[in-house]
Image: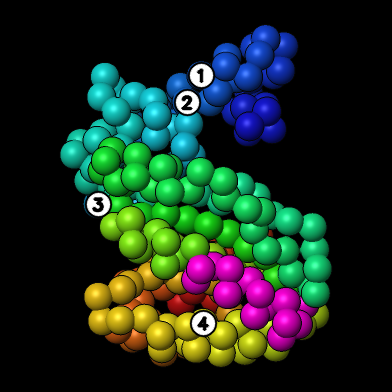
């Protein structure tokens, strides 16, 4: 948050504690969301921090403002960051208090959640641990009535990126096979080395949507890979 505020033009000497810092951050987000350019004609969904979900925009709660005013689908970031690297990957830290957070999000009108892991090497054990953990949380999220975005990001600079993608997709497909017809996830993946690599996920009946993760590619490269 301090880095984001600094990039926006607000230095650390302009706030005295975390409460003031997060209030300034929310004011910045509110200005962005209230811009005429920010609406459902251009933006499908927005991922909120818990702090943003608990605040107001334009005199109403943030989730309500996003959907009812802007027609932008609200998602909530639920992960608590990454654990230290092991077996070439970083799984997520534990998420204490997830159940009450999901209940509160559902009551507030949140549609889904987002949680990120990180993959650096094409380690079958490591990638398996990432996907197992993502789906373990996804089942809890689906049971709470929300749609989980599964985000196992692959390092775009990894020399094993293509192989890591093959291992990752195999693990995802294996887990999808165990979902029932009423269970759906979104899958957020780094833009792949091979065109149409994730086409089978796009067409999978348990996948609501596949989301492209630019992952550090500049916009020109990301657009070319996305196309």
If you read the primary sequence from the N terminus, does the residue marked by circle 4 or circle 2 appear first?
Answer: 2
- Label 1: how many residues lie within 10 Å, few (<14), some (14-19) or many (20+)? some
Q: CA distance from mark 3 to mark 2?
A: 23 Å
**Residue 200 screen position, x and y as percent:** 41, 89
If you read the primary sequence from the N terminus, does the residue marked by circle 3 or circle 4 appear first?
Answer: 3
Q: Which residue is mark 1?
A: 23
Please check the rendered image and state whether residue 135 is part of the magenta-colored stretch, yes or no: yes
Q: Nearer the viewer, residue 221 or 61?
A: 61
For the residues labelled 3 and 1, say whether their Cβ atoms are less than 8 Å apart: no
Q: CA distance from mark 1 to mark 2?
A: 5 Å
Q: Which residue is mark 2?
A: 26
The secondary structure making up most of the magenta span is helix
Residue 61 falls left or right of residue 187:
left
Q: Which residue is mark 4?
A: 172
Q: Secondary structure at mark 1?
A: helix
Of tags 4 and 2, which is closer to the observer? Answer: 4
- Label 2: how many residues lie within 10 Å, few (<14), some (14-19) or many (20+)? some
Q: Residue at x 33, y 32 (%)?
A: 62
Q: CA distance from mark 3 to mark 4?
A: 31 Å
Q: Nearer the viewer, residue 155 or 103?
A: 103
Q: Secondary structure at mark 2?
A: helix
Of tags 3 and 4, which is closer to the observer? Answer: 4
Q: Residue at x 41, y 88 (%)?
A: 177
């Amino acid at each position: 948050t301090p880095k984001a505020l600094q990039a926006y033009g607000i230095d650390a000497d302009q706030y005295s504690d975390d409460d003031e810092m997060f209030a300034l951050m929310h004011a910045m987000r509110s200005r962005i969301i209230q811009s005429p350019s920010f609406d459902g004609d251009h933006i499908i969904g927005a991922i909120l921090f818990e702090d943003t979900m608990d605040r107001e925009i334009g005199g109403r709660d943030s989730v309500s403002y996003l959907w009812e005013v802007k027609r932008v689908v609200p998602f909530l970031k639920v992960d608590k960051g990454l654990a230290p690297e092991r077996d070439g990957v970083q799984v997520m830290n534990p998420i204490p208090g997830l159940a009450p957070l999901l209940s509160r999000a559902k009551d507030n009108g949140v549609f889904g959640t987002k949680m990120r892991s990180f993959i650096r090497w094409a380690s079958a054990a490591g990638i398996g641990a990432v996907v197992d953990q993502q789906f373990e949380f996804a089942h809890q999220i689906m049971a709470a009535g929300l749609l989980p975005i599964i985000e196992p990001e692959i390092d775009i600079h990894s020399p094993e990126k293509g192989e890591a993608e093959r291992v990752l997709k195999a693990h995802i497909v294996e887990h999808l096979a165990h979902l029932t017809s009423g269970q759906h996830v979104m899958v957020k993946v780094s833009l792949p080395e091979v065109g149409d690599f994730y086409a089978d996920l796009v067409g999978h009946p348990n996948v609501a949507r596949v989301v492209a993760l630019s992952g550090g590619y500049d916009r020109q490269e990301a657009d070319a890979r996305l196309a």
